[in-house]
Image: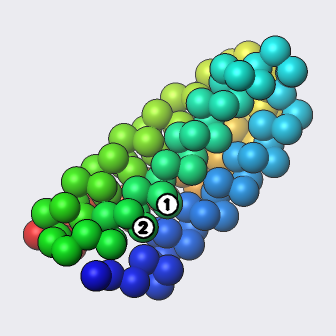
Amino acid sequence: MNNFRELKVWQKSIDFVVEIYKITKSFPSEEKFNLVSQMQRAATSIPSNISEGAGKNSNNAFKNFVTISIGSAHELETQIIISSKLGYVSNEANRQLLRELTEIQKMLYGLFNSLN
């Protein structure tokens, strides 16, 4: 079993979940059950799958869950871009969110590669 709480990517993705929740609070109410929900679920999926995979008893199982986290990170990237195009997120906030998410994605790929 791996201690997921010590993983920098888990720590960073937890902080990113909080950012996503804060930023989606300002979205229009009609997006509550659509884009807001999807973004929050995708963001939450990243650290959740890291921790679930870390609890598995093999690196192959852990790698599978890291792969799910990577997929969720890319899904969230698309949703952030959509939010920006709809005017729900400012250009500066969009750039900052995408910078942070790109860093998380790189860390996830690094974690995946380290499990080989």
For this view, does 81 lie left or right of residue 6?
A: right
- Quadrant in the rendering for residue 91: top right
Q: Is residue 83 in view? A: no
**Which numbered disc covers residue 79?**
none
Q: Amino acid at mark 1?
A: Pro
Quadrant of image for the N terminus: bottom left
Which residue is disc 2 drawn over? 51
Left or right of 4 in this view: 90: right
Local secondary structure at mark 2 = helix
Residue at x 13%, y 63% (from the top left corner): 60
Q: Determine crowd level at label 2: few under 14, some 14-19, many 20+ residues with C-alpha closer than 10 A.
A: many
Expressed as whole percent of the image width and height from the top left, the position of residue 31 reads 76, 20
Indicate whether 51 appears above or below 79: below
Residue that mark 1 sits on: 47
Q: Amino acid at mark 2?
A: Ser
Mark-to-mark CA distance, 1 and 2: 6 Å
Measuring 52% from the left and 29% from the top, which residue is drawn there?
A: 78
Callout count: 2
Residue 32: x, y in percent? 77, 25
Residue 81 pos. (x, y %) = 60, 28
In the image, 111 versus 53, the foreground residue is 53
Q: Residue at x 88, y 34 (%)?
A: 26
Residue toward you, 23 or 3:
3
